[in-house]
Image: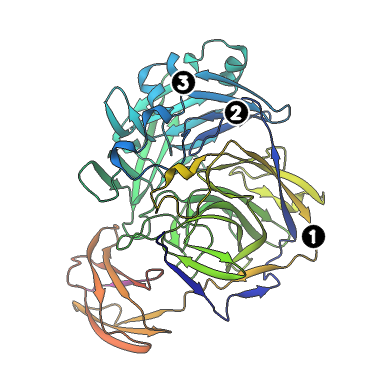
């Protein structure tokens, strides 16, 4: 088997007492629910303690051969209701509902968000019999969660509990759907039509969204509609899919979200490592910090401690470019399956930290799983759990269901996808107070710095001063304030220490230029330059 391992020995990566306070053990306990299959990359809603499971896939990670990738026979064509308290499940086939709805609701990597009793589902990718091809669906569908659940349990018709509209702005898979105030945010993702091909042969077309698509939804009448549509585009920082979008409470109390990692960088098939914060006022790349231990869509949950003004995010398994082995941080650029359970935290000053927890997933699992939160706990409108309002020393924060299970770290890279399967396991996730808990902290600081001068400038050339802690590759992007990349390339002969060079920005014919430098394929530094006319 071909593997690429780099073991990182850094003095700055060490076992420390946490610089933020999260003194809980994470305890996973398997729960058995009769009749519930293995699924991954599905959508879910919940009501009164019961779950609604829609779409996703019944097989493991997709094969590398176009003819064998995402077979329609492995689409999940059943909708499930799960009562986790009684460990029961019920199901109904989507085949009884209109073609446009039933095809979307058996797709994978849909974008979804539950708003009250309505579960909104956008996009998704699957084989569609009506098109005789694989496609990204261009639909927005609303689901009446409680009434659909009741109908499935009672075995009565389900068609009346769906509404759907179509528009190409919704043709996104692998993104995430969120809501701030009254506005929905469709974040990242891509449109992928045709059959997957690892050699980039012309069996598909793919277009990254590179954007946050904002709109309102009116679900009040018999017809579904949307309005107030706008896009925020950034082809560098928002070029992401298959990531985790984690709800946040920011240090000033504002509610929003954080884009965590995701794939793929523009110039190299590796994950992004730095996060991007999303607020009502805009989006904010946090390039001074890298998150190493969770790079792919997995179960995740946000918890906020209002007493200490600290935000904590937990990530469960999945796939990652970095993981710990025998106490050492390993870099594997094939981005394998991992067992890691990790935490990122934000303190009252906005500083970010990452920790490797002393507990792991029971196996190589978690990619494409979902964390279903315990709604009986106090929580904010974006589902962040209000940690400081919980007085118990141990409590269930939710459940993990499904995902991809692998018996090999590199099953996808080695084209041994038969070693993977859809995981049927449900885990109860409990926090147990442990005041003496110590965890392994990772230094996520960006060690690279850049100075651009003069700024503002009336010239088409600026002076750039680099400060490199070690010799490495240096790439760059020149983009406009509207997020369009107008030039990209590599810089040669930059070495450890301080180096200066003249840098042309003539390709950007705008008043503002954003220069982004990429060091070692993982550290980003962006500088905005004002061009005086």
Mark earlier in primary sequence (1, 3): 3
The answer to whether residue 109 is seen in the rendering is: yes
Looking at this view, is 237 or 137 the one in front?
137
Mark earlier in primary sequence (3, 2): 2
Mark earlier in primary sequence (2, 1): 2
- The residue lying at 73 percent from left, 68 percent from top is 438
Find the distance from the CA under tag 1 to the CA under tag 3.
46 Å
The stretch in magenta equals 525-532
Image position, residue 35 (x, y; %): 61, 25
Marks 2,1: beta carbons within 8 A: no
Q: Specify the color scheme.
A: rainbow
Marks 1,3: beta carbons within 8 A: no
Marks 3,2: beta carbons within 8 A: no
| Above/below status of 248 relative to 134 | below
Image position, residue 139 (x, y; %): 36, 30
Picture disc at residue 162 = 3
Find the distance from the CA under tag 3 to the CA under tag 2.
23 Å
Image position, residue 120 (x, y; %): 47, 32
Label 3 environment density (alpha carbons within 10 Å; few <14, some 14–19, many ≥20): many
With 395 as the anchor, is 514 left or right in this view?
left
| Above/below status of 128 relative to 204 | above
Residue most toward the top? Answer: 156
Q: Is residue 106 magenta?
A: no
Q: Dot 3 lies on which element?
A: strand
Q: Name the residue under label 1.
A: 434
- The residue lying at 52 percent from left, 30 percent from top is 119
With 431 as the anchor, is 40 left or right in this view?
left
Looking at this view, is 205 or 323 the one in front?
323
Looking at this view, is 181 or 27 the one in front?
27
| Above/below status of 412 relative to 163 | below
With 314 as the anchor, is 192 left or right in this view?
left
């Amino acid at each position: 088997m071909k593997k690429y391992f780099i073991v990182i020995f850094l003095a700055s990566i060490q076992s420390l007492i946490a610089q933020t306070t999260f003194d809980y053990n994470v305890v996973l306990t398997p729960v058995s629910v009769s009749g519930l299959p293995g699924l991954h990359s599905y959508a879910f809603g919940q009501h009164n303690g019961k779950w609604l499971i829609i779409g996703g896939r019944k097989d493991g990670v997709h094969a590398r051969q176009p003819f064998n990738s995402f077979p329609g026979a492995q689409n999940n064509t059943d909708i499930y209701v799960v009562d986790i308290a009684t460990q029961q499940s019920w199901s109904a086939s989507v085949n009884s509902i209109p073609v446009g709805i039933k095809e979307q609701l058996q797709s994978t990597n849909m974008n979804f968000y539950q708003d009250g009793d309505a579960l909104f589902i956008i996009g998704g990718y699957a084989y569609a019999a009506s098109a005789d091809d694989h496609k990204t669906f261009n639909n927005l569908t609303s689901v009446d969660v409680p009434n659909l659940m009741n109908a499935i349990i009672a075995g009565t018709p389900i068609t009346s509990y769906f509404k759907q509209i179509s528009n190409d702005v919704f043709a996104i898979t692998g993104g995430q759907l969120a809501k701030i105030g009254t506005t929905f945010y469709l974040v990242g993702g891509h449109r992928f039509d045709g059959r997957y091909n690892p050699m980039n042969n012309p069996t598909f077309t793919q277009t990254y969204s590179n954007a946050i698509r904002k709109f309102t939804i009116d679900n009040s009448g018999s017809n579904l509609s949307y309005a107030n549509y706008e896009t925020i585009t950034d082809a560098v920082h928002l070029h992401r899919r298959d990531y985790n979008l984690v709800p946040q409470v920011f240090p000033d109390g504002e509610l929003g979200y954080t884009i965590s990692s995701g794939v793929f960088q523009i110039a190299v098939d590796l994950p992004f490592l730095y996060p991007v914060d999303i607020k009502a006022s805009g989006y904010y790349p946090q390039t001074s910090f890298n998150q190493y231990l969770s790079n792919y869509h997995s179960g995740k949950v946000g918890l906020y401690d209002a007493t200490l003004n600290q935000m904590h995010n937990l990530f469960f398994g999945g796939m990652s470019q970095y993981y710990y082995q025998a106490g050492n941080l390993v870099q594997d650029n094939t981005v394998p399956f991992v067992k890691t359970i990790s935490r990122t935290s934000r303190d009252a000053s906005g500083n970010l930290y990452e920790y490797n927890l002393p507990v792991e997933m029971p196996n190589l699992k978690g990619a494409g799983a979902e964390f279903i939160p315990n709604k009986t706990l106090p929580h904010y409108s974006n589902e962040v759990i209000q940690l400081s309002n919980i007085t118990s020393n141990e409590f269930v924060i939710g459940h993990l269901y499904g995902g991809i299970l692998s018996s090999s770290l590199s099953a996808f890279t080695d084209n041994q996808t038969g070693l993977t399967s859809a995981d049927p396991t449900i885990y109860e996730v409990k926090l147990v107070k442990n005041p003496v808990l110590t965890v392994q902290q990772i230094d996520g600081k960006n060690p690279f710095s850049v100075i651009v001068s003069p700024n503002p400038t009336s010239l088409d050339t600026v002076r750039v001063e680099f400060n490199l802690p070690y010799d490495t590759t240096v790439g760059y992007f020149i983009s406009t304030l509207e997020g369009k990349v107008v030039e990209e390339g590599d810089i040669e002969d930059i070495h450890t220490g301080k180096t200066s060079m003249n840098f042309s920005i003539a390709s950007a014919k705008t008043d503002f230029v954003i220069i982004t430098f990429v060091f070692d394929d993982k550290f980003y530094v962006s500088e905005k330059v004002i061009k005086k006319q």
